[in-house]
Amino acid sequence: MADRPVTLFDEILSLTRAIRAAFDVRTKRVDLTYARARLLTTIGRNQGASQSELAQALEIETPTLKRLLDALESQGLAERRPLERDARKHAIYLTDTARIEPLLRFRGEVEQALVEGIDPADMQATHRALGQMIRNAERMRQE
């Protein structure tokens, strides 16, 4: 089979897999899965959000979110509280024992490691290019 050139798409997928693998190692150290860690950090940034709002933010189905939230609740890391305006719905909060600092610290460490040795002007161009790629992909998703 002939070697084909590595495309930008291939490189982005490889980068994503490498980041995910590194994140998985760190989440296991704090007794979490990648999916639970994502939910935990999303709750941390959106305290009091509803389950449907969190599912939308994570781009997952509500039943999937419910299972992840059940697991975080059983670990004592998150809790559901009835919404004042509609007791049938719940707002989601981190508990006092939830420790997302290791996950947030890891995100900062990864970003710092990823940009090491890259000229700031190149990083500005990269941010612009990636931003445009995201907008293009969003448009494709809506077609």
Image (cartoon, helix red, strand yellow):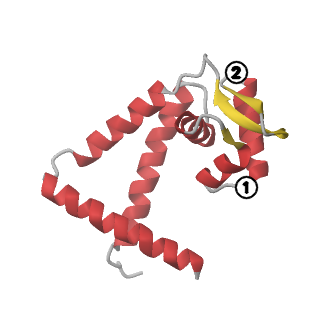
Residue 142 versus residue 30 in the image, above or below? below
Residue shown at the point (43%, 75%) measured from the top left: 136
Q: Which residue is mark 2?
A: 76
Residue shown at the point (57%, 39%) measured from the top left: 46
Q: In 3D space, how far apart are the residues under numbered discs 1 and 2 (Cα atoms)?
A: 23 Å
Disc 1: CA contacts within 10 A as few (<14), some (14-19) or many (>=20): few
Residue 28 in the image: state x and y as whole percent. 56, 30
Q: Say what amino acid the circle numbered 1 marks.
A: Glu
Q: Could you tell me if the residues under marks 1 and 2 are in contact, i.e. CB atoms within 8 Å?
A: no
Please tell me in which quadrant of the rendered image residue 42 appears: top right
Residue in the foreground of this view, choosing between 84 and 45: 84
Residue 96 versus residue 118 in the image, above or below? above
Which secondary structure, mark 2? loop
Disc 2: CA contacts within 10 A as few (<14), some (14-19) or many (>=20): some
Please tell me in which quadrant of the rendered image residue 98 appears: top right
Outermost residue, top side: 97
Residue 126 versus residue 4 in the image, above or below? above
Q: Number of callouts in the render?
A: 2
Q: Say what amino acid the circle numbered 2 marks.
A: Gly
Residue in the foreground of this view, choosing between 42 and 18: 42
Q: Which residue is mark 1?
A: 61
Residue shown at the point (32%, 43%) measured from the top left: 111
Which secondary structure, mark 1? loop
Residue 141 in the image: state x and y as whole percent. 56, 75
Q: Does residue 56 appear left or right of residue 119 in this picture?
A: right
